[in-house]
Image: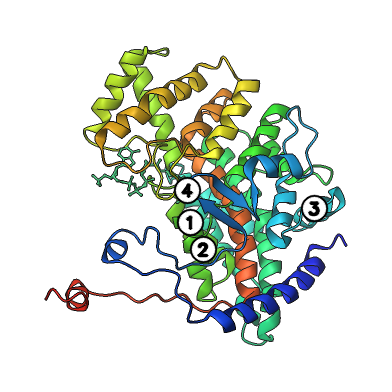
Amino acid sequence: DNDLKEVMKRKIKEHRELVIKFRKEHAKTKLGDATVGMIYGGMRGLAAMLCETSALDPNEGIRFRNLTIPEVCCKLPKGKGCNNQPYPEGLFWLFCTGDIPTIDQVNFVRMEWICRAELPQFVIDLLLGLPKQVHPMAQLSAALSVMSVCSEFPKKYNTVKKDVMWELMYEDCMDLLAKIISVASIIYTHTYKECGYKPIIDEKACWTKNFCISMGYEEDAFIDFMRLYMILHSDHGSGNVSAHTVHLVGSALSDCYLAMAAGINGLAGPLHGLANQEVWKFVLELQKKVGKTPTDDQVKTFVQEKLKTGVVPGYGHAVLRKTDPRFTAQKEFCEKNLPNDPGVKIVWQLFKIVPPLLQSLGKVQNPWPNVDAHSGAILQAFKMTEMNFYTVLFAVSRALGTMAWLIWARALLLPIERPKSYTTAELMKMVGTS
Ligand code: NMX
Ligand code: MLT
């Protein structure tokens, strides 16, 4: 069957039965205890959330529906570009069903998104009316928030039977994914280019190609890299700031546009997705200070100086304890396609020099690079130089994973999220120190 919604209907029925049985049998089974350290420490390591679409292992990195990044890249149906990267439409099918799709199933998603791609005029007018100095992430958040008016969910959520509520969410999420590439491309062309703003949705092209062409990038190699980019940034468990926010806001039965806008606001923080912009700023500052091809000693001195007042963007992680496989996938892409690019070479030089420096601080849990350490150099090499736009690409990709999980959250009828908070005085009393 090529119809994603029909396949999901079957999968949801089976999975609901499994979850109901498991919850009944283990409702009181303990999985660990919260500590005072966890409560003050950003809930690091606290077993408290569900996510069926992806799971993050500190040493191995992310798995999408139990497949590692190399497995996903190998198994999903591929585009015809020179590097043969998989279609993000296929990844969405995988997130939604847990199955590797056939090419016909990928085509089903591709055509659904093409048919739903048109933007309401007021969204275009809103974006064109925004001052160009509004950060692209704020523009994306604003556009998605107002698109809430397109959602069917608020109109019907209280009248449909609970067990079909996910179908409303499915329709809205498919619309959002179809439209987000046009919103992002308008943000790009309006903010940075003189050429028009009209997104191009070609029925014969895939989601990524339509996105790239709408931004003015027609080169096959760029489109192919963008497929990889869309795969790599799509999901990272549900505890990261953006995915958690989407889920949290969705749990109040806010529609998917409002939930995604909220997640985007979190992704726009420099400790999260904005790090990709910050990495390139860091590299530019380094090059301005010591030239385009710095020596290892010059890089070391620069990093040491920066560490006196801040963090090295693109390094460290709240969960990962090894080099991010998403960094490695981009490095491998460059080894094949951009081995002599000066920006890429600086990223590799930082990879050699930064980890020992972070280790020497004695407090950094993970001195290794994360996904954001590499992407900027590749985008620069493809002449997408506007670094303030980079996190918008991350956001478009993150919509794939978060929308799939939002549909499933409604399918599993997950309740409004509401953990218990304590005052310091209460905590002191609980541990017997007051
Ligand atoms: N450079 C310098 N210091 C660092 C770094 C780094 N890259 N990473 C962690 N530290 C410091 C951190 O600031 C903290 O210092 P202090 O105790 O003085 O406050 C100490 O090391 C312990 O922090 P950790 O427990 O290792 O890290 P935590 O889980 O709190 O934070 C990040 C994780 C990702 C926020 C942190 O590593 C960081 O700020 N990295 C740089 C920003 C970045 O690349 N973010 C992108 C993450 C991926 N993404 O896309 O979201
Ligand atoms: C992500 O992709 O969301 C980041 O690596 C941050 C995280 O997982 O906490």
Which residue is the site of mark 3? 101
Question: Which residue is located at x 37 percent, y 58 percent?
Answer: 44
Left or right of residue 148, residue 58 in this image: left
The total of numbered circles placed on residues is: 4
Distance from Cα at disc 3 to Cα at disc 4: 28 Å
Q: Is mark 1 within 8 Å of ligand 2?
A: yes
Distance from Cα at disc 3 to Cα at disc 1: 26 Å
Q: Which mark is residue 58?
A: 4
10 Å crowding of disc 2: few (<14), some (14-19), many (20+) = many
Question: Which residue is located at x 60 percent, y 43 percent?
Answer: 232
Pointer 2 with pointer 1, Cβ within 8 A? yes
Which residue is the site of mark 1? 242
Circle nearer the viewer, 1 or 4: 4
Q: Residue furthest left?
A: 434
Q: Secondary structure at mark 3?
A: loop
Circle nearer the viewer, 2 or 3: 3
Circle nearer the viewer, 2 or 4: 4
Q: Secondary structure at mark 2?
A: helix
Pointer 3 with pointer 1, Cβ within 8 A? no
